[in-house]
Structures are given as structure tokens and as C-alpha cells.
Amino acid sequence: IDLDIVNQSLQRYPDNKLFQFLSAQFEEAETLKLMKKYMVGTSKYWEGATVFWQMDYQNRVRTGKIMLYNPATGKRIKEPYNHVTWVHSVLHKKDCNLKQCFFEEHLLPEDKSRPVALVESEKTAIIASYYLPQFLWIASGGKNGCFNSEAMQVLKSREVTLIPDLGATEQWKEKSALLSGICKRVV
């Protein structure tokens, strides 16, 4: 995805439903810093929707996940249907050969000494980074996300803590074996 498209989305934060929710928790100035740091965008696809850009280790934008949130609760809108789609689909990129990467993978080269915390949800990574800044927070984009040996290579020689959602602990324990030969340490 062209960086111009990403940059166009990095605005209109007062309209962004996730921004509205987070601003009620952390104040607007702090929320703006988080949105800018994590390059979270605003989409017109659904009014006020959030775009979580997947930018890889080499700063290439692979795609963006568009999600709509309830500004009062911070929960995803799932009725009357699940409001989740992808930028490459919205742009009708027929020649797209999608290989997902971690949300915020592009931050890994910036700080090679800080331990990495891997969670499922992009929203969780943003919120956790506010409370526990000693970790570099990334997200797999779901329980299965980008848990494959190719995607995991970006975590080579890193200390990684896996923090699965409820109900996924056993599955992530099994998947942690993928990381044991790559990472310096996996917890």
C-alpha cells in the first residue's frame, strides 16, 4: 500500500471512534501521541472507523485492518454484522499477494534492547503500551494471526513475552515452540 494512502489516514482523529474511547481514558493529548506513534489511521469506509496499518520490518505497508468501535465502550461493532475489513480489499487490489506481518513490526529495528510483548489485538497493544512502556508492544492480529516461522523471523534474538487472550493460552503455548529456536527467550 502506498505511503500516501497511509499518511492521508493519519488525521481526522476527533472523528475516529477508537480515538474517542481512548481519549476518555487517557486524555486527548496522550491518545494523540499513541495514535501517531502506532500510525493508527481513520477510515471513511465506515464513518469514524480505525485503520491498523501492518508495516513490516522494512517499513513496507502490507495492508491495513479497518475496524469500527463503539466510542463509549471501546468494543468492536459486531451488529448487525462484524465491522472488520481490509484496505487491500477496499482498494480492490486484485494483484495483492498478502503476507501479513505483526502490527507495529516496523518499531522493532528502532529499539533492539527492549523486550517485546506480543498480544492478539492491535487495540490491546496500544493500551498496554501506555501502562507498560518498558515493553515494545506488537500484535498478531488475532489468535492465529501471523504465527508462522517466516513472520516470526523478525523476533530473532529478542526477549519475547506472549500474552494471549482468554481461551487461547494452550494454543499459544504450543505456538511458542516456533519461537524457541528464533528468540533469545520466550515466556
Image: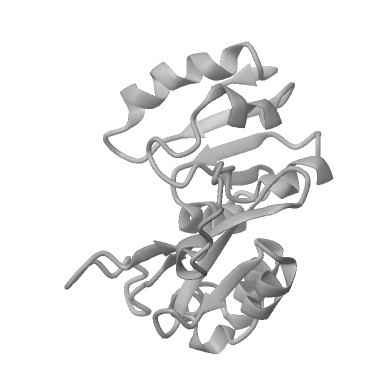
State which quadrant residue 61 falls in. bottom right
Residue 96: percent from the left, percent from the top? 55, 52
Q: Residue at x 59, y 42 (%)?
A: 101
State which quadrant residue 152 falls in. top right
Question: In this orientation, which residue lies closer to the viewer: 11 or 89?
Answer: 89
Q: Residue at x 66, y 17 (%)?
A: 182
Q: Along the horizontal axis of the image, is 39 left or right of 162?
A: right
Residue 37: percent from the left, percent from the top? 70, 63
The figure's colour scheme reads one colour
Residue 56: percent from the left, percent from the top? 69, 46
Instruction: Say above or below: 6 vs 116.
Output: below
Quadrant housing the N terminus: bottom right
Instruction: Say above or below: 142 vs 183.
Output: below
Q: Residue at x 39, y 35 (%)?
A: 144
Question: In this orientation, which residue lies closer to the viewer: 12 or 24?
Answer: 12
Q: Residue at x 69, y 32 (%)?
A: 154
Quadrant housing the C terminus: top right
Residue 16: percent from the left, percent from the top? 49, 81
Question: In this orientation, which residue lies closer to the viewer: 175 or 148?
Answer: 148
Report the number of discs.
0
